[in-house]
Amino acid sequence: MATQDYQEDNTIPERPKVLIHRLPSFNLEFSCRLRTHFDLLDPLIDLPPADYFANVLALISVGPSPVTSDTLALLPSLQIVLGTSAGFDHIDLAECSRRGIAVTNAGTAFSEDVADYAVGLLIDVLRSISASDRYIRAGLWPIEGDYPLGFKLGCRRVGILGLGSIGSEIAKRLVPFGCRIAYTSRKEKPQFPFTFYENVYDLAANSDILIVCCSLTRETHHIVNKDVMAALGKDGVIINVGRGALVDEKQLVRFLMRGELGGAGLDVFDNEPYVPECLFELENVVLSPHVAAMTPESMEALQDVIFTNLTAFFSKQPLLSHVQND
Amino acid sequence: MATQDYQEDNTIPERPKVLIHRLPSFNLEFSCRLRTHFDLLDPLIDLPPADYFANVLALISVGPSPVTSDTLALLPSLQIVLGTSAGFDHIDLAECSRRGIAVTNAGTAFSEDVADYAVGLLIDVLRSISASDRYIRAGLWPIEGDYPLGFKLGCRRVGILGLGSIGSEIAKRLVPFGCRIAYTSRKEKPQFPFTFYENVYDLAANSDILIVCCSLTRETHHIVNKDVMAALGKDGVIINVGRGALVDEKQLVRFLMRGELGGAGLDVFDNEPYVPECLFELENVVLSPHVAAMTPESMEALQDVIFTNLTAFFSKQPLLSHVQND
């Protein structure tokens, strides 16, 4: 094991080695501060020295680049996996747990931007902003006349699936619009003044809008199934800024095509970058290429989270955004 | 003068006569309550009885249907004009004032919906929601890859031009996004905790985003001129949910085409339903067919405002949404 990267006095050694793990299609421009303090190696660019994989302690997994048990098996000394997303469904948490490997995520770096985007998608779906922009660009306003009315946001019952750092930011933003907020979460969170439902069915049955922003885990895979959609009802709107697989996409498409849901705002899909093409025809759906988290500001915040976690790890301090594998 | 519509004891007479004035392209489905309590006559549908125009006291002007001095000259007994918009630039206020005719507008019936829409347009422009929806529908995501980053809303300096009932609703909504709010208005409004600027130039020079939501009057015509746009700067964003003529549209188009503004979200235009077609090519502009105020809920609220104003007028009580002609 590469003990040279640990200091006995809990100070950080000079430029500890950190392996970058990424699919060729995912890149992250690491900050000067990260590059100055850590020796980042990206095998897609630089050849690793002999024994590098055997000794490296820390791995940054960029975006959805999968960290499987096979990946982990190549890195026998690994002690920490740093994800760069809020979600961690691409990391084999069970294997990490078995091997005592810590896992961190992006923490709250993306929470505000994702919350902003969720509100933007919601207003867009209810008030047909993207659809009426298309209407104008197609030259239809002078020909067809007034665009159909949208729906008021105020007084709508908004159900938030997952009142974590993103969900609570969404709720905070929607309060002054006059929305009535409820949620479901693993546990009730009495610090928030919102109605708690034990499960997503009861939440959907008592909501006009369902905002999906929980983590994707084995338990939450397809948590928004056809029964939830039926409970939400034919005027119901689904906003998904979590992960595609939180929603049963085939059923979602079926409900939307049949008019059994009122609309949807979707930033995430089952098989990105592929989006079910039949949705392209629908005016009550807003489609977005998994960008809710993405601003220059959130990218900077992410670098800070990675820096803080790496610094904490190499000086044996508590991690900033440790993912609980429970 | 048609005194039969006044009661000496301030009670409302039976079904007072109310004239509907509208362009053929603008219609409003009046509520059952309004039709029950008032005798509404729409000359585009029903022939007015003899002497009707000479005697009628109350006129509802639908949408932007112009109430000029010529219109007013046909109605010698007129005592009140009830507009159905928040704006009243289509009503000759000076002539009404000279003749002692009261003018009412939609009051706050539309404020929440317009504020919701302004926030929706703003998030859409900053985060490219409509543009990225187009990107997906054009099938470009799998071909061209990631969509360019948008900009974070939090910490942006938002300047509100007109902190009336709409502007203050916008401000309230933007606070939890972390925006820094400032405004200009005819007078400082110390009841709000936002920075006041004496004029729109200083406001623009100290803002990243300018939201235009004041009334269109002689004084505010083209209030957002090229100097204001230059002060806002090349990353600046203009959101207009007021009236087209508040902004010098030719200059706005020029600034946007040259990249001298960062973007715009426009619900209103100079010559609706005609939108400058060169804007159709721009990805940093969101175009909307004057629908910010329009939801079924706001239409209902409008009917309540008209009902309350008519009831007050015919019983000589204070009007709900009297437009001050100052």
Image (cartoon, coloured by chain):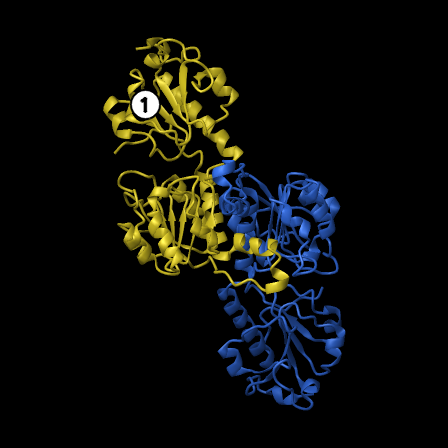
Chain colours: A yellow, B blue
Residue A52: x %, y % from top left: 37, 12
Residue at the image position 47 percent from the left and 54 percent from the top: A281
Residue A276: x %, y % from top left: 41, 47
Question: Callout 1 environment at 10 Å: few (<14), some (14 to 19), or many (20+)?
Answer: few
The answer to whether one can see residue A242 in this image is yes
* Amino acid carrying mark 1 in the image: Thr
Location of residue A155 with respect to A215 vertically, above or below: below
- Is B105 on the left-hand or right-hand side of A102? right
Q: Label 1: state its secondary structure.
A: helix
The answer to whether one can see residue B248 in this image is no
Chain assignment, label 1? A
Identify the image quadrant of residue A204. bottom left
Pick whichever, A34 or B193, lies toward us.
Answer: A34
Tag 1 residue: A71
Q: Split into 4 quadrants, where in the image is the N terminus of chain B? A: bottom right
Residue A268: x %, y % from top left: 41, 42
- Is A324 on the left-hand or right-hand side of A138? left
Pick whichever, A62 or B187, lies toward us.
Answer: A62
Most distant residue in the left direction: A98
Residue at the image position 68 percent from the left and 49 percent from the top: B278
Location of residue A8 with respect to B168 vertically, above or below: above
Pick whichever, A125 or A288, lies toward us.
Answer: A288
Residue B325: x %, y % from top left: 70, 66
Pick whichever, B161 or A23, lies toward us.
Answer: A23
- Is A19 on the left-hand or right-hand side of A29? left
Q: Split into 4 quadrants, where in the image is the C terminus of chain B? A: bottom right
